[in-house]
Image (spheres, rainbow, N blue to C red):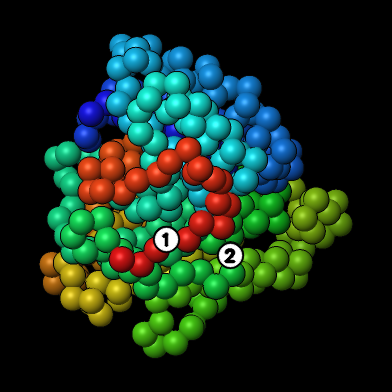
């Protein structure tokens, strides 16, 4: 079955052509460059970008796959969660194509697509059951996944998502947007890795929930109270005195400590869930799953776990993309799930426990 996937939940316009787990094309046009000066995604700008670029992404996806629109047998589109205007653009295209081609339409939950994105790799696809961790700019949640694409929510963030905390800390440090890549790069350059210790939220002995608002605030207060690096030197935009190498190194050390604390929390909770539910596999998806240090930490933790193995998607499938929508949509369709032309955008769509 040839499936057209459409993803427009936030600031990436994605269109793909897939069949089973075979990916013929996966086109992504990002509007991130338009949001940089605002330090975050502006919904109106994202929506306008989707409207302008989605037909071009569709044309390019078909051309790259060497297929024609008449070859499509299923339309799979993200219907939530996400920005309502952005979602409506993708859903409107999906509905019009479904109607004009007389092919079925299925709505796909964006979070679930990230959860199962590791299945896009045929060679290393995990087996059931497993603990799934979705960690991105908008979502941080743990699931217990049994056979047949069924899942149970185990825990989630009580405030900021992990990727959101990255963005906010990058804004505090004036590093730009998005925060994930710039903080990861700065952390790698840290030379005083034991200098700063930020607190990790404690939510209870066996709690599987997350909280990242506290560490964001801790970074803010640390920056405000930093000693002068060069007395008499002009203040930087975020309150650090001093210029050049010393100030840059201080920022690197802050990034390192912040990142270590956030990633340790993700790893600790995921392995705790695996132990509590007696499973030997952990699957990680979402934009933060592209972080090399997170992958390294999971790999190291797995060595001392007594046989637990961690799975990650290829980095190109960690970010928002339509291939994960198309592949999951087809799987769900084959298992009897259905949508129709009354499919609507659901910005607060939750993952149903099954």
Is residue 191 positioned above or below 261 on the image? above
- Coordinates of residue 22 in the picture (x, y in percent): 22, 30
Q: Which mark is residue 351?
A: 1
For disc 2, the marked residue is: 160
x 65%, y 40%: residue:
85
**Residue 346 at x, y percent in the picture:** 55, 51
In the picture shown, does residue 185 fall above or below 30?
Answer: below
Residue 40 placement, left or right of 301: right
Judged from the image, the secondary structure of the residue bearing numbered disc 2 is loop
Q: Quadrant of the C terminus?
A: bottom left
Who is closer to the viewer here, 129 or 235?
Answer: 129
Whichever of callouts 1 and 2 sits on the residue coming sooner in the sequence is 2
The percent position of residue 78, horizontal first and vertical second, equals 46, 42
Disc marking residue 214: none
How dense is the environment of label 1, judged by Cα within 10 Å: few (below 14), some, or many (20 and up)? some
Q: Secondary structure at mark 1?
A: loop
Does the residue at mark 1 contact the one at mark 2 (Cβ under 8 Å)?
A: no
Q: CA distance from mark 1 to mark 2?
A: 18 Å
- State the image coordinates of residue 196 (x, y, percent, origin top left): 56, 69
In the rendered image, the vertical position of residue 147 relative to residue 106, given as above or below: below
């Amino acid at each position: 079955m040839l499936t057209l996937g459409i993803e427009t939940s936030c600031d990436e316009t994605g269109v793909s052509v897939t069949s089973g787990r075979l990916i013929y094309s996966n086109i992504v046009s990002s509007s991130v460059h338009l949001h940089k000066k605002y330090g975050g995604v502006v919904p109106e700008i994202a929506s306008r970008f989707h409207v302008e670029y989605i037909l071009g992404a569709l044309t390019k996806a078909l051309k790259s796959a060497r297929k024609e629109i008449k070859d499509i047998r299923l339309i799979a589109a993200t219907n939530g969660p996400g920005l309502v205007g952005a979602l409506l653009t993708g859903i409107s295209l999906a509905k019009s194509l479904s109607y004009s081609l007389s092919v079925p339409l299925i709505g796909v939950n964006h979070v679930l697509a990230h959860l199962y994105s590791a299945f896009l790799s045929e060679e290393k696809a995990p087996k059931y059951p497993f603990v799934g961790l979705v960690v991105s700019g908008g979502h941080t949640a743990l699931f217990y996944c049994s056979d047949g694409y069924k899942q149970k929510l185990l825990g989630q963030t009580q405030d900021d998502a992990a990727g959101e905390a990255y963005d906010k800390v990058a804004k505090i440090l004036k590093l730009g947007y998005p925060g994930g890549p710039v903080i990861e790069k700065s952390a790698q350059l840290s030379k005083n890795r034991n200098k700063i210790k930020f607190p990790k939220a404690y939510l209870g002995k066996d709690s599987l929930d997350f909280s990242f608002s506290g560490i964001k605030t801790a970074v803010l207060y640390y920056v405000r109270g930093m000693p002068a690096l060069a007395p008499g030197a002009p203040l930087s935009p975020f309150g650090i005195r001093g210029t050049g190498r010393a100030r840059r190194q201080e920022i690197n050390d802050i990034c390192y400590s912040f990142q270590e604390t956030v990633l340790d929390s993700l790893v600790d909770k995921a392995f705790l869930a695996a132990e509590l539910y007696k499973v030997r596999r952990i699957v990680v998806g979402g934009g933060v799953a592209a972080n090399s240090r997170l992958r390294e930490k999971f790999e190291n933790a797995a060595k001392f776990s007594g046989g637990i193995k961690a799975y990650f998607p290829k980095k190109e499938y960690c970010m928002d993309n339509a291939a994960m929508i198309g592949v999951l949509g087809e799987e769900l369709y084959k298992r009897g799930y259905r949508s129709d032309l009354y499919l609507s955008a659901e910005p607060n769509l939750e993952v149903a426990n099954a």
